[in-house]
């Protein structure tokens, strides 16, 4: 059975909206798109290349799919580390409103998310990868379907925009598996979901 691996870019205040460009996602009047661009460097590029090299298929939310489909099919070099896998491997879009998708190799995921994604994991050779897709990611975490979560935290605070874990998110504990910091200050951390949070106290001992 394959594994479901999610990679997402966030700011220090947890915003995941429109990391790639000003027009990428302007919902809610968001005007600060493109905040990841100034921090791109060889270190982050190598990490992204490593991630895409392990892909066996892609599971995307509708908005992320639309963003990717408007860009990556135009990058036609099959050896490109991101465009190559995206254009050649199966893509699955979770949407109830997407008409016949035009990007080659795309299927729409219907019906029960838990059932459908479990089946996709079982038949994917390699990682079934989710990129961005914050709303979908939260649903997948709630359903216990995410095996690995890569979080790239950028050294910027925006004070506005859609946050990955807003109030009301299901409490979840994670186990840290690996991490690094790029030359431009991006913290790349890898986690595995580990059930519910644990709690304790730092109260002074009784004889203090």
Image: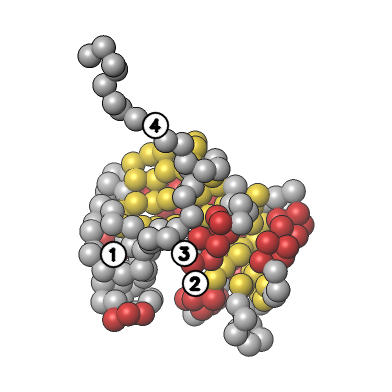
Dot in front, 3 or 2:
3
* Residue mark closest to the camera, 1 vs 4: 4
Residue on which the image places disc 4: 200
Identify the residue shown where x is 29% and y is 81%: 29
Is residue 117 something one can see in this rendering?
no
Tell me which label, 3 or 2, sits earlier in the chain: 2
Residue 36 sits in quarter = bottom left
Query: Toward which corner of the image does residue 14 lie, by quadrant?
Result: bottom left
Q: Residue 35 bears which disc, if any?
A: 1
**How far apart in space, not on screen, are marks 4 and 3 (Cα)?**
30 Å
| Residue 98 % position (x, y) | 60, 84
Residue closer to the observer: 197 or 106: 197
Return the x and y of residue 70 as percentages of the image width and height. 49, 80
Which element is circle 2 on?
helix
Report the mark closest to the observer, 1 or 3. Answer: 3
Look at mark 3 in the image and give the residue it sits on. 134
Residue pictured at 27% horizontal, 46% vertical: 185
Q: Which residue is mark 2?
A: 64
């Amino acid at each position: 059975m394959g594994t479901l691996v999610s990679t997402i870019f966030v700011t220090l205040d947890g915003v995941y909206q429109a990391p790639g460009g000003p027009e990428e996602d302007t919902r809610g009047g968001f005007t600060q798109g493109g905040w990841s661009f100034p921090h791109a460097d060889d270190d982050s590029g190598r990490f992204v290349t490593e991630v895409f090299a392990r892909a066996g298929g892609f599971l995307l939310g509708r908005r992320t799919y639309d963003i990717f489909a408007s860009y990556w099919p135009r990058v036609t070099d099959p050896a490109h580390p991101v465009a190559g896998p995206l254009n050649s491997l199966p893509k699955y879009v979770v949407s109830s409103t997407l008409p016949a998708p035009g990007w080659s190799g795309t299927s729409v995921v219907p019906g029960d998310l838990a059932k459908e994604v479990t089946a996709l994991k079982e038949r994917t050779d390699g990682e079934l990868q989710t990129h961005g897709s914050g709303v979908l990611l939260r649903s997948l975490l709630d359903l216990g379907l995410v095996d690995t979560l890569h979080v790239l935290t950028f050294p910027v605070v925006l004070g506005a925009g859609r946050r990955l874990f807003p109030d009301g998110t299901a409490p979840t504990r994670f186990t840290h598996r690996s991490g690094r910091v790029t030359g431009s200050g991006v913290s790349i951390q890898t986690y595995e979901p580990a059930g519910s949070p644990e709690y304790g106290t730092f109260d002074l001992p009784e004889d203090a």
